[in-house]
Amino acid sequence: MRREPVLRVVGKLLIPYMLLFALYVQFHGDFGPGGGFQAGVIAAAAVIFYALIFGLPAARRLAPDAVVESMVALGVLIYAGVGVAGIVLGGNYLDYFVLDRDPVAGQHRGIFWVEAGVGVTVSGVMLKIFYMFAGRGRAQPRE
Amino acid sequence: MMAATVLAIVLQRNLFSVVVLGGIYSFLMATVLVALDAVDVAMTEASVGAGISTVLLLGALYLCGGEEAKPLHRPWLPLAVALVIVAALVYGTLGLPAFSDPLAPIHVHVVPRYLNQAMKETGVPNVVTAVLASYRGYDTLGETIVVFTAGIGVIALLRRVRRGEGKQ
Amino acid sequence: MSVLDHYSYWITVLLMVAGLYIVIARGNLVKKLIGLSIFQTSVYLLYIAPGKLIGGTAPIVADGFKVYSNPLPHVLILTAIVVGVATLALGLALAVRIREAYGSIEEEEILAAERDSEGRA
């Protein structure tokens, strides 16, 4: 598929917009539909699209295995970390209103970091699962 | 239309077309969800159901082979079981509240508090995000852990085959 | 109590039983997993349809709108969708491993291979 000019051109045009759209959905989730899950899936879909057109090794150069695997764990740690920050600053686990002097701003911060953690984990897991399925050859493993 | 798609999925034996029909079914479901005012859910269902699920199914089909064998037994027993379950469930749903009934229990317990206070307490207009991340944050933590577990489960199951023998 | 009142529930029941039928009546593992995911999507409909209020709008607080559809099922179903795809991914990984171990993903062929290996062992 690397040699199909239509796919390559369309891919090069669309993939940056897909990643940008994923970021938009992530951060605009407070005001419109969206949030961490949708953003994570869209970001993973952008990289999967890249892998389908330009080949798995090219995608592995773009998003190396080690980075994706650490993203999988990092998101959960961010989420749990927000909870621990709640305890450290004086409230219960996952209390957001202690994260800032103004409780509503504290809620904003808490929700922001929590959604970021969710987005990171979801995109990492979806991408990693795709790598595992696509990288496992049938008779001869392709690498 | 969704019923027709599902019927086609049941009867088709070429798995590749079943996967494509599954993608169509997901998009139809997302459209129905938008008609029911569930915009977040529709976005998630469209991206996850029609996007990721289709990719994963195609990957698995490539690794497994794409044709379903003809069933050996006539499916009378499963068909009878299915019809009995349909009858029982339809009888059960007759007791449920009518469509769009504002006095149904789902609308009167805790939801008015979420709808009225979400803006004041969290400053976030999207009530679904506010409930998901703030009022019910523990559930979302559990869900993130479930996704994480699925990821490491797939990693554990599908680590790379060495030439000649598989991992045990 | 007219037909229109409960129409959404009946569609849900139809989809649910279709998914269930695929799971119990078909032998191919991948097709069973697809049936399972159809079953799960029917449950989404089961939860969200009662939350809709005719004349309401999406539950995003904005000036000028008074009636909102119920946001609580949306939250629960968001979680359910993601858990559903996690289940699908794990199930497919298992199907791939079964295929590599037994050479087939048809339930009857796998059971026959198991019986043969037990008979010989």
Image: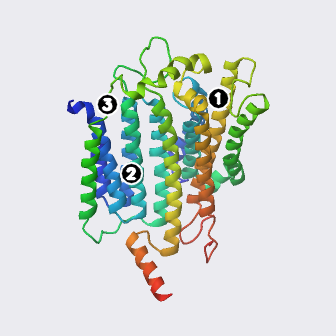
Quarter of the figure with the N terminus of chain B: top left
Give the amino acid at mark 2: Val
**Could you tell me which residue is drawn at 38 percent across and 60 percent down?**
B15
**Residue B82, image x, y percentages:** 28, 55
Quick one: SS at disc 2? helix
- Chain to which mark 3 belongs: B
| Displayed quadrant of residue C31 | bottom left
Residue receiving disc 1: A111
Q: Are marks 3 and 1 on the same chain?
A: no
Q: Residue at x 45, y 33 (%)?
A: C73
Residue A23 position, x and y percent, is 61, 33
Q: Which residue is mark 2?
A: B20
The chain holding disc 2 is B
Q: Which residue is mark 3?
A: B97
Residue B13 higher or lower than C69, as above or below = below
Residue lying at 23% horizontally and 31% vertically, measured from the top left: C4
Q: Quick check: do tags 1 and 2 share a chain?
A: no
Q: Is residue A55 visible?
A: no
